[in-house]
Every structure is written in C-alpha cells, then in structure tokens.
Amino acid sequence: MNYPKIVKIETQADQHFLRPLNSLVRALLLLAPGLGKQTAVVNDLELAFNEAYANIVEHAYGATNKGPIIIEITLSEEAVEFKFEDFGKEFDYSLVPEPNFERPANGGLGVWLIRRFMDECVYSRENGKKNVLRLIKKIPAADL
Amino acid sequence: MNYPKIVKIETQADQHFLRPLNSLVRALLLLAPGLGKQTAVVNDLELAFNEAYANIVEHAYGATNKGPIIIEITLSEEAVEFKFEDFGKEFDYSLVPEPNFERPANGGLGVWLIRRFMDECVYSRENGKKNVLRLIKKIPAADL
Amino acid sequence: MQIVEVNGVHIIAMSERLDVPVAPVLREAIKNLVEQNYTRVIIDLSKTKFIDSSGCGALVASLRSLIRSKGDMKIAGPSPQAKSLFELTRLHRVFEIYGNVDQALA
Amino acid sequence: MQIVEVNGVHIIAMSERLDVPVAPVLREAIKNLVEQNYTRVIIDLSKTKFIDSSGCGALVASLRSLIRSKGDMKIAGPSPQAKSLFELTRLHRVFEIYGNVDQALA
Ligand SMILES: Nc1ncnc2c1ncn2[C@@H]1O[C@H](COP(=O)(O)OP(=O)(O)O)[C@@H](O)[C@H]1O
Ligand SMILES: Nc1ncnc2c1ncn2[C@@H]1O[C@H](COP(=O)(O)OP(=O)(O)O)[C@@H](O)[C@H]1O
C-alpha cells in the first residue's frame, strides 16, 4: 500500500458530526501501519481529534457564528497528522493554562489533553481570517 | 438542528478507505432524522454507498490509473443523497444488464443493488473528464 | 442512558459514549434527582467505551452537586480508556471508583 | 477469519465484515483447502454484520469450486442483513443456510 494516505473532510461546524467523524478517524487509525494493535494510542488520538473538533465548534464559532471546519488527516508510516481549518475567532492555544488538578472543574481539560496526547500542536492564523491547527503524533513502536 | 446537513470527503481512490468511509456513513445515517431506528434502511444505504465507492476504485480508475474520489453526503429531513465525483473512465450505468439470477456469478451484483436500494441513480460526464454519480433515497416513513 | 433505583440508590447506566452530546443529559438527570432529594447515585460506565473531556466535566459537576446536597456518587465499571483518562487528569483521586455496580452497591 | 476442523469439516469463521478487503482472502482459503482435498466447508457468518456484493461473489465462487471437487458448502448464522441480501439476489436458493454451526454440522 502506498503512504501517505490522505483524507479531506469538510463539515459545517456542528457537534452533530462529532461521533460520525470519530468513527471515521478510529477506523482509519486502526488500519494505519503500526497502529492496528495499539488500542491505547488509537484511543488517545481519537480523543485529541474529538477535543479539537469540539472546541472549534464551541469556542471558535460558538452558538451564533456558523462556518465550515475543514479537516485533513494524513497517515504515514511514521506519523498521524490532523489538520483543522476554520474561519472563527482567533485563538492562541499556548495561552491556555494548565488545569488546576487540586480543584477539578467542569471543563478546561480539552486543550491540555490534546497537548498531552500529540507530539506537536501548531496553531497559526492565516490571512487574518483562517485558523489552522496542526496536530501531529509520531507512531510509537509497538511493544511486542 | 438545522437541515440539510452536508459532509464533503475527498480520498485517493483506494479500497483501503472503504471501511472507514462506511463507518462514517453509517454513523451519519443513524443520526439522520427518521433513520435512527430503521436499521434495514441504514444497511441498504451503507451497502449502496459501499458498492458505488468500490466500483469507482476498481472500474473507473482500476489498478494502474490513480486519482481522487470526491464525495458529498447530504442529509435532509426527507432524503439522503450520496454524490460521487471521479476523473476515471467514462461509464454508462444504464447499460449494466440485470444479473442472471438463474446462474449466479462471482460478481455483477453491485450496480443492480445500488439501483435497487436507491430511488434515483443519476450519472453524468462533465467537461469530458469528470464522472458524477448522484444516488438519492427518500427516507421512508418508519413503521411504528 | 438508563436510570434504575435500588434501595434508594439511583444507578445511571451510560451508553457507549459519554461525550459532548450526552454530557448535558447526564447533568440534567442529576439536577432532576437532586431536586427530588435523591442524592445517592452510581454512574455505571460498564457499557461506555469512550469518555471525553466534556464527559469528565459532567462527572465532576455531578459529584459536586450531589456532595453539596449531602449525597454521594460512585463510578462503576470504567473501561481502560476511562480509567486511564481519570488517572491522567487525577480524577481517580476525586471519584470513588468500583469494578462493577454490585461492588459499588455493597 | 479463522479456520477450525471438526470431523473432516472445515469451519471458516468470518469476522465482522465480508467485503472487498476480505473477499479474496476467503477465496484463497477455499483454494488452499481444495488443493489439499478438503472439500466439506461451513462458512460461519455468526459474527458478520455486513456483507457486500464482493462477499456474495466470493461465496458463490467458493461454493462452485467446492462442488466441482465433489464437496459441499454450508452457510451458518447469517445476520438479518446477510439473509435479506441473499434473498434479494436469490442466493438463498443456491446456498444451504443454517441458523448456526451446530445445526450445519448435524
Ligand atoms: N478553537 C478554539 N477557539 C477559541 N477558543 C478556544 C478554542 N479551544 C479552546 N478555546 C478556549 O480555551 C479554553 C480551554 O479549552 P479546553 O481546555 O478545551 O476546555 P473547555 O473547552 O472545557 O473550556 C476554552 O474555554 C476556550 O476559552
Ligand atoms: N464506476 C464505474 N466505472 C466504470 N465501470 C463500471 C463502474 N461501475 C461498474 N462498472 C462496470 O459495470 C460492471 C458491473 O458492475 P457491478 O454490478 O458492480 O459488478 P462487479 O463490480 O462485481 O463486476 C463492472 O464489471 C464494470 O465493468
């Protein structure tokens, strides 16, 4: 099979699509070379994907603002990349504080989990209107 | 929730993507208004989607020719539409003969099943290079 | 999501996913129970394969609201994904976690 | 896909999907059995939730090749989706279909 394999998806920003997209991502990951048996890594990647999409719907667009989310998933033999593009609010991921683990809250874990599960989390604002978030994880060697 | 809901997907033509795409389609359909409890209809739609994608990979492109498949899924309250676009061989779906049910063969059921499960199956060749296949199914009223 | 009552304890069995679409449903269910003064709850996660941050948030909010009403909340049967998420977020120190509903009831 | 032998009958248990990626694997497995003169086969579909036209094609090809070698092929435990597909394509008149493997073995 020839790598990288790339899937592009575009939806309106809508939590409705979270579960169908997660199903696609999970099935894709389980077919990736080196990930099929690493359920824990697949779980982490699915969660990171889920948090990033959910945040864009909830925070970049919010209840009143609507627009598309454009996703590109790249599977190679070494890494998995999720790229998200949206036209909502500008946002600096690096400003999100660490959660206060001594005082658990009703939220505030999503960005921390994304960072924790992915090796790279790169955000850029393009042309003053597009948010681009690239999440990359190197595929760990399977313990045999 | 606001309908229609539209998802666009683009992949290289590759049977590798069949199962992940089927997972997405199935999960989307189960969320569509009026389809959640109609498992048999969801099965039929999933199968039609699967056959159309598989045929484009195998027949429109084939082993040597490579190119993208662009999919648009539209869920409305009345209908489900799958639109497939590819840049492979031209093909007239209406020329596919009925299977010979007296003499079962190793193949030749795909297009017949698509027609059988969908209400409309419209093919067009655009600009002498693009194949566009639109499959539409009206959502049947659920038997209560 | 399904709720049954056993000896004054309400067991809320979550379905396959505890994520953005269901997190508010869980919070609403807890609110309704607290309003009726039912404050002893077990959240049964034995069918739940996937929890996300909104699910964790809903569990924290539920626990808080039950404790505020002098009740308690136990979590039963988390999957490996749920367990490792609770540990990572230190929520395993905050939640009372049991292997299954029977153990949580005992 | 898993193959076990019981009293000279080979039971091939298909996994969740009998579709484009596995159809050729099934055909290859049948070819290997026939080459070794094992021609009595049960295809166990009890775990299989989804069959497509390539799956039907592989079953027809398998049946043909086994009959040509004076063997037989039974299908056990098809799901509602598989059953309705077999009926629609009239394959239920061609296949010997049983509720489960035990009935097919009996
Ligand atoms: N894509 C985004 N666009 C704008 N703001 C965001 C985005 N993602 C996260 N945020 C902001 O960062 C905060 C922390 O996000 P997160 O860790 O996911 O927790 P939560 O979503 O539960 O608040 C959010 O409350 C929001 O203010
Ligand atoms: N998208 C397509 N592009 C070109 N040819 C096609 C396409 N789909 C089907 N065909 C042709 O129609 C025939 C019948 O297709 P189908 O009913 O799916 O059966 P099968 O794929 O098993 O042959 C194929 O063998 C192929 O020649």
Image (cartoon, coloured by chain):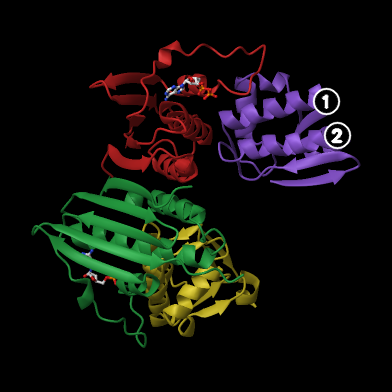
Chain colours: A red, B green, C purple, D yellow
Residue at the spot of label 2:
C37
At label 1, the amino acid type is Ser
Marks 2/1 in contact by CB < 8 Å: the verdict is: yes
Subunit of label 2: C
Q: Point out residue C46 in the picture as x, y percentages from the top left corner.
A: 70, 41
Element assignment for label 1: loop
Q: Is residue D87 above or below residue A132?
A: below
Image-based side of A46 in relation to C27, left or right? left
Q: Can residue D41 be seen at all in this image of the molecule? A: no
In this view, the residue in front, B120 or C97, is B120
Mark pair 2, 1: CA separation = 8 Å
Q: Point out residue C35 in the picture as x, y percentages from the top left corner.
A: 80, 34
Spot the residue most to the right: C7
| Quarter of the image where the C terminus of chain B is located | bottom right
Subunit of label 1: C
Q: Is residue B19 above or below residue C72?
A: below
Q: Is residue D81 above or below residue A135?
A: below
Element assignment for label 2: loop
The image quarter containing residue C3 is: top right
Q: Is residue A136 above or below residue B77?
A: above
Residue at the spot of label 1:
C69
In this view, the residue in front, B133 or C44, is B133
